Image: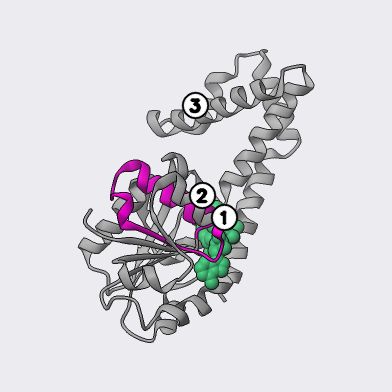
Amino acid sequence: MDKKIGFIGCGNMGQAMIGGIVKSGLVPPEQVYAADPSEQNLNRVQKEYGICVTQDNLVPAKKCDILVLSVKPYLYTDVIEEIRDTVKQDVVIVMIAAGQTIAVNEARFGRNIKIVRAMPNTPALVGEGMAALCANSYVTDEEKNEVREIFESFGKAEFVAENMMDVVAGVSGSSPAYVYMFIEALADGAVLQGMPRQQAYTFAAQAVLGSARMVLETGMHPGALKDMVCSPGGTTIEAVASLEQDGLRAAVIRAVDVCTEKSKAMSK
Ligand SMILES: NC(=O)C1=CN([C@@H]2O[C@H](COP(=O)(O)OP(=O)(O)OC[C@H]3O[C@@H](n4cnc5c(N)ncnc54)[C@H](O)[C@@H]3O)[C@@H](O)[C@H]2O)C=CC1
Ligand SMILES: O=C(O)[C@@H]1CCC=N1
């Protein structure tokens, strides 16, 4: 892609996206810019990925065709105020912050600005991200495809209606945290039964990875896949009955629900 891609904010999510883009070879590292006040973060991405780094937000603002605002939601007002007179006329702004709506941010720019709102997740760093995207009417189909290509360079990406963005935070933006908790708990159970800890993380994480691929690649219902593991009178159904008793599913459904509600509340 012959575009310059900039990041304002180079923390967890910015670094995950930069890592994904550079590793995929979508654009050469010289075409990727990151601005952040943290020298430590900049040194890390500069050393690891060879991209252009600066503490001045106006550098990527001036140079980039696609500009990702990867700062915390509360900083959007200040950052937009800082860059809005410097960005290219035709720049495509990509907003990845939870609870930041297109309408509110169009108003902050105060002109007809192209905005794509996205909700990615950190597995982007290993090329297995999941992102939802939606765009305002100023973004052309070609530009939408370019932004989709960026997100697809480190995982899957789908356009959705903007009113789906809150639930996307609940089901994929934030859910890696719940999955890590599940992996940690699986490993703790194995350690309790005598397995060395590092080995336990490998066994637990590979089981989660393989199960996720089964859902995506077989297209089978998760319940049917679960039934395939449960031998009558066997070990698995003992564990499944125990998880039902302890409310695993109810706990997860509630987690997605409260996360979604928090995202909605942040939009107000
Ligand atoms: N971490 C995640 O899993 C996900 C995060 N997001 C969104 O990504 C955004 C960033 O989140 P994280 O990367 O987790 O936060 P973070 O705290 O790791 O990174 C934010 C970065 O912004 C920098 N920063 C602070 N003030 C700045 C300024 N004025 N100009 C430029 N950079 C500045 C900080 O030094 C830091 O490196 C948030 O809006 C969040 O909602 C979206 C999806 C997933
Ligand atoms: O916790 C957060 O607010 C961000 C948004 C999705 C994942 N992390």
**Residue carrying label 2:** 44
The residue where tag 1 is placed is 40
245 or 50: nearer the viewer: 50
Q: x and y percent of residue 86 in the render?
A: 35, 79
SS under mark 2 = helix
Q: Identify the residue shown where x is 51% and y is 49%.
A: 44
Which residue is at the front of the view, 169 or 22?
A: 22
The residue indicated by pointer 3 is: 210
Q: Secondary structure at mark 1?
A: helix
Question: Looking at numbered disc 1 in the image, what kind of residue is underneath it?
Answer: Gln
- Left or right, 142 with respect to 162, comes to left
Sequence-earlier tag: 3 or 1: 1
Please state, as top left, top right, bottom left or bottom right, where the C terminus lies in the image: bottom right
Q: Residue at x 50, y 53 (%)?
A: 43
Residue 149 sits inside the magenta stretch? no
User: Which segment did they paint magenta?
Assistant: 10-39
